Image (cartoon, rainbow, N blue to C red):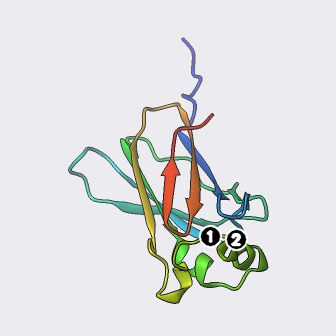
Amino acid sequence: MSSATAAPTSVSTHILDTSVGRPAEGVALTLSVRSGSDGAWTAHGASTTDADGRCKDLPDLPAGTTHVRLDFAVEEYFASPRKAHQQAEEQQDAPRARDSGAFFPEVAITFAVQPGEHYHVPLLLNPFGYSVYRGS
């Protein structure tokens, strides 16, 4: 009989600010988990993106997790003065996001997980929209 333990279920993410073509540094996020589609959400971890737009310190998921939610606090990111954002906005005809705050003040991504899998969930972000997908 083998006493090997199952591989952990894990999540990683990164954010690319597509309005400037660079990683989004300094975005706070929380990771929440639940068991079953009607289970209560439980906060399980928090992090902030590094200079590469990555969170490398999210904890493995607890046994029994079936759903994960990543909550990205993007309002603060777009509200902070960044020269690259100012240059990008000057090149656009769209209204500026900072004139009245972020259009999307937060981004919540919810997805289902299977035990022993790794889920990389990149967020492509700009002041007026976002896209997400399961990466590798």
Instruction: Provide residue 73's location: percent of width, then percent of height.
Output: 52, 72
What is the CA distance from the residue labelled 2 to the residue labelled 1? 7 Å
Instruction: Provide residue 19's location: percent of width, then percent of height.
Output: 65, 63
Horizontal relation, residue 38 to residue 71: left or right: left
Relative height, residue 32 to residue 132 (above, below) = below
Instruction: Provide residue 67's location: percent of width, then percent of height.
Output: 37, 46
Check disc 1 and report the residue beneath it.
92
Looking at the figure, which quarter contains the C terminus? top right
Relative height, residue 54 to residue 86 (above, below) = above
Horizontal relation, residue 67 to residue 20: left or right: left
| Amino acid at the residue labelled 2 | Ala
Identity of the residue furthest to the front in this view: 93
Q: Foreground residue, 63 or 104?
A: 104
What residue is shown at x 33% (from left), y 60% (from top)?
Answer: 41
Relative height, residue 80 to residue 123 (above, below) = below
Q: Residues within 10 Å of mark 2 (few under 14, many from 20)?
A: few
Quadrant assignment, res 81: bottom right
Instruction: Provide residue 64's location: percent of width, then percent of height.
Output: 37, 41
Q: Residues within 10 Å of mark 1 (few under 14, many from 20)?
A: few
Relative height, residue 113 to residue 59 (above, below) = above
Q: Secondary structure at mark 2?
A: helix
Which mark lies nearer to you, 2 or 1?
1
Looking at the figure, which quarter contains the N terminus? top right
Q: Are marks 2 and 1 in contact (CB under 8 Å)?
A: yes
Query: Which mark, residue 33?
Result: none
| Amino acid at the residue labelled 1 | Gln
Check disc 2 and report the residue beneath it.
88
Horizontal relation, residue 48 to residue 109: left or right: right
What residue is shown at x 66% (from left), y 84% (from top)?
Answer: 80
Q: Secondary structure at mark 1?
A: loop
Identity of the residue furthest to the top in this view: 1
Quadrant assignment, res 58: bottom right
